[in-house]
Amino acid sequence: MAAMEAALLAPIADAGSNLLAARYQMAFTLGFHIILACFGVAFPAIMLIAEYRGRKHGDEDALRLARRWSKAVAVLFAVGAVSGTVLSFEFGLLWPGMMDRFGDAFGIAFAIEGLFFFLEAIFIAIYIYGWNRLPGWAHFWSGVPIVISGIGGALSVIAANAWMNTPAGFTLGPDGRVEDVEIVDVLFNTSTFHEFVHMWVAAYLVAGFLVASIYAVKLLRGDRSHYNRLGFLIPFTVAAIFSPIQVIVGDFVARDIYEDQPVKFAAMECVYETGPDQTEYIGGICTDGKVKGGIGIPGLDSLLAGFSTDTVVEGLNDVPEDLQPPSPTLIHLSFDAMVGIGTLLALLAVWFAISWWRKRDIPENPWFLRIAAASGVLSVLALEAGWIVTEVGRQPWIVSGYMKVEEAVTDAQGIWWVFALTMLIYLSLAVITGYVLRGLGQRPDEEAPAGDIPYAPRPGEETR
Amino acid sequence: MSKADLVAAILWTGVTLYAVFGGADFGGGMWDLLAGQSERGERARWLIDRSIAPVWEANHVWLIFVLVVLWTAFPTVFSAIMTTLYIPLALAALGIVLRGAGFAFRHALPGPVRRPATRVFGISSVLTPFFLGTVVGAVASGEVPADGGGDPTASWTGILPLLTGLIFVALAAYVAGVFLVRDADAAGDEDLHRYFLQRSLVMAVIGGAAAVAGIFALQEHARYVYDGLTSWPGIFLVIGSGICGLVALVLLVTGRSLNWVMRPAAVGAVVTVIWGYFAAAFPYMLPTDVTISDAAAVSDILTVVIVVFGAAAVLVIPSLILLYVLSQRQALE
């Protein structure tokens, strides 16, 4: 018992574990926020497609969906706004060392992001508030700036993250501080473009599949109303268009990582010995300098990295131990999970496309809807897995090649407690958000009193 | 005026906008907390909701703006503050999460769970500005060393930081109260007009008394700022604040419905205090250790911040005005 207690308390007592606590805290809060960010970026577009259809074709069900979805957007945006604010605090509270030395170069993208966030917050309010105040198409157009700011905001945040992976656009003075900044090179460093496209498309996959999966469940239960079909078809079509694209984008991203971040690439593919003709392992555990278990396809890794089995892939053994990512197995399996789910979802999209092309309908095989019902959760898993590859794969660096996480972390004590409290609050937030969204998703004719949603008009003001 | 000074002024503009608009939203939450369960209280709560709901997220973005400009343009000061005042800052972040979530959820939850969400919203609306106030008070009194790592508790638990926290709370409630008087008028509710008039008056007195006490605390604990406030140009702003405060007070006491005077006067009383501090602390960011020019990032970065602020002025401000107009017009319906 005492031993167990000691084992449990050890991380709290050990000052050196501050780093671990700070990393958990950051990983958990970011991993939470990234889902909400996807909704902020992509859900408004899906909502606008529904409104467009409603107005253009006089489809009342489409308009009802748009209205219902806008309420979900409001709730998710509110939670995302606060979880995003927490991240701004955390940069300073957890990683003061990085902000002290690189706050200017790292931070500049956030100044631009702030602008887009502002516009997004304003137009989301106008859109949701304007359902009864703005005439038809004016209301539709008030939603368009939300989609555009979603793109701009995502690009800015990703530029900052890409800069941590492949920092550029500055020189260091004799005191180790940033000098001679080239803003364009900071913002558009080598990882910005591929990370942005990959993440932006991922946002549409996550929002599209998650919303569609809710209606897939309703369709499976036999409610085949026009309303439910539309609720499935609009988000699913968006996700279905993007999911094969994501496979191609992902392939480009992997080759860019091979070029620019060879250590991350080695961890992703669990490569230990530098050389050509590398085996691609699917699954397996990276240990003792080799892959245990997993299915090996000889030469494929080299082929994927450089279109030839002669392509030399750098191995982890050539990297000093203290500069290797801490858990290649986690990175490798996360990568495989992301690729596996991405491929599955792309195949689901192809299935849907064939069925639609042949008979203008959702595939009749119940397995289609069953997989579609799971696609939302699967896409979130793929999102988180991809995020783990990017972020854990960058370790031990916080600014690759310039500063390690251990140099950046705060000295403040008690982070394990903060982490425990954060877990508690965020999990409650997640549960309540799920509960609230479930309430919104009740049957269409049981319109919740409109005053029950942030910004919505009050009861009695509803004019439909 | 150097480029760094201009960026510091931009930063301070963000602080001002957050203090007034974000502050009014927090103040609304405080009035919500104090509204009680009576029928009258429920009506007050309804009015508060109607005023805050469409704008609170946009108003909240000013805080993000302030943080981002601070870490981008003055990274060492940002890190010095964060490594010293991490306790009140973490508590403020906690308050921000609970305030936002409490407000968003209380609308969307069924009856029985709505009350705790409302309570969370109210309590966090008091705590957040209080802790942000202690941070400002600690900075003013020179508790944040240039290299950071100051005393994590003593730095913000002195008389001046605690008093500043109290002033923030009182002023937020005061501004919110004055805004709500106008919103009650717009809704044609005579009773709520009186309700918020009385409450604003009480807060005006508390806020004013705390501000006067604050001046004495400054004399004791933040001599540089005190001297700045009692000499040109700081004194000019202090007098301006006093005049605005008195005008608003007279209108509150006489119960006159001159919203077009009362609102600007109440806001003016707050804005002049904020800029009075800026003028008094100038040229320091951390009085009297780090000046604005010491802390400023390289020139190219400052240029980008200025350009982004210019873009914000062109894009965001008209959009914000559109939002405010739409939400006000609704109140007139």
Image (cartoon, coloured by chain):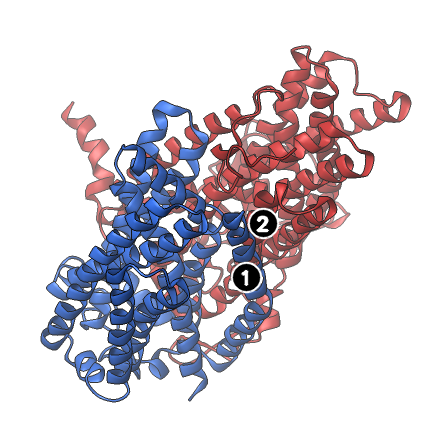
Chain colours: A red, B blue
Q: Quadrant of the N terminus of chain A?
A: top left
Q: Residue at x 23, y 78 (%)?
A: B287
Q: How many tags in the picture?
A: 2
Disc 1 marks which amino acid?
Ile
Residue A298 at least partly seen: yes
**Chain ID at mark 2:** A
The x and y percentages for residue A317 are 51, 49
Q: Nearer the viewer, residue A309 or B138?
A: B138
Q: Quadrant of the C terminus of chain A?
A: top right
Return the residue at label 1.
Answer: B321
Q: Is residue B68 above or below residue B51?
A: below
Q: Residue at x 58, y 49 (%)?
A: A126
Residue A276 at least partly seen: no
Q: Nearer the viewer, residue A237 or B12?
A: B12
The x and y percentages for residue A103 are 43, 67
Q: Nearer the viewer, residue B176 or A389?
A: B176
The x and y percentages for residue A286 are 51, 36
The x and y percentages for residue A440 are 54, 27
| Mark 2 vs 1: CB contact within 8 A | no
Q: The residue tagged with tag 2: helix, strand or loop?
A: helix
Return the residue at label 2.
Answer: A126
